[in-house]
Image (cartoon, rainbow, N blue to C red):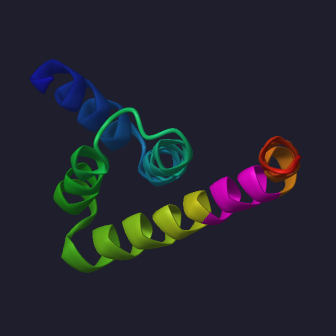
Amino acid sequence: MINLIQTIIDLIMSTEIYGVVFSCLIIIVESIVPIIPILVFISINFMLLGNIMGFLVSWISVIIGCLISYFIFKNGLGNHFENLTQN
């Protein structure tokens, strides 16, 4: 786990704008498919971007990921589950 975190930090620190975009995309994907705890990526953002910017980037990314997840399940899978519950 420590090697994974160090690899992500090295990748993000290699370029500034790509690092922010990469960390946003990772948090958005993690919000849709929660496999890895989000605390890891939020901590990385805090270490790399500072307290305020790391918080804002993480917060906005989580909101975008949750909205995407909501609309995927509402529009894509909502009808499937509704049909299963109705007789």
Q: Is residue 36 above or below residue 30?
A: above
Task: Tell me where residue 29 appears, x and y as whole percent.
Answer: 54, 42
In this picture, residue 61 sits left or right of residue 2: right
Task: Tell me where residue 57 appears, x and y as whole percent.
Answer: 42, 68
Q: Is residue 61 above or below residue 72?
A: below
Q: Is residue 51 above or below residue 76?
A: below
Task: Tell me where residue 61 appears, x and y as whole percent.
Answer: 50, 63
Q: Nearer the viewer, residue 18 or 4?
A: 4
Q: Residue furthest front?
A: 87
Q: Residue at x 31, y 42 (%)?
A: 13
Q: Which region shows up in magenta?
A: 67-74
In this picture, residue 49 sits left or right of residue 12: left
Q: Nearer the viewer, residue 64 or 52?
A: 64
Q: Residue furthest left?
A: 2
Q: Residue at x 58, y 57 (%)?
A: 65
Q: Residue at x 15, y 19 (%)?
A: 3
User: Across the whole image, how many numbered discs are drawn on residues?
Assistant: 0
Q: Quadrant of the N terminus?
A: top left
In this picture, residue 2 sits left or right of residue 29: left
Main secondary-structure element of the magenta-colored stretch: helix
Task: Tell me where residue 71 appears, x and y as whole percent.
Answer: 76, 60
Q: Nearer the viewer, residue 48 or 57?
A: 57
Q: Residue at x 21, y 69 (%)?
A: 50
Residue 3 colored in magenta in the image:
no
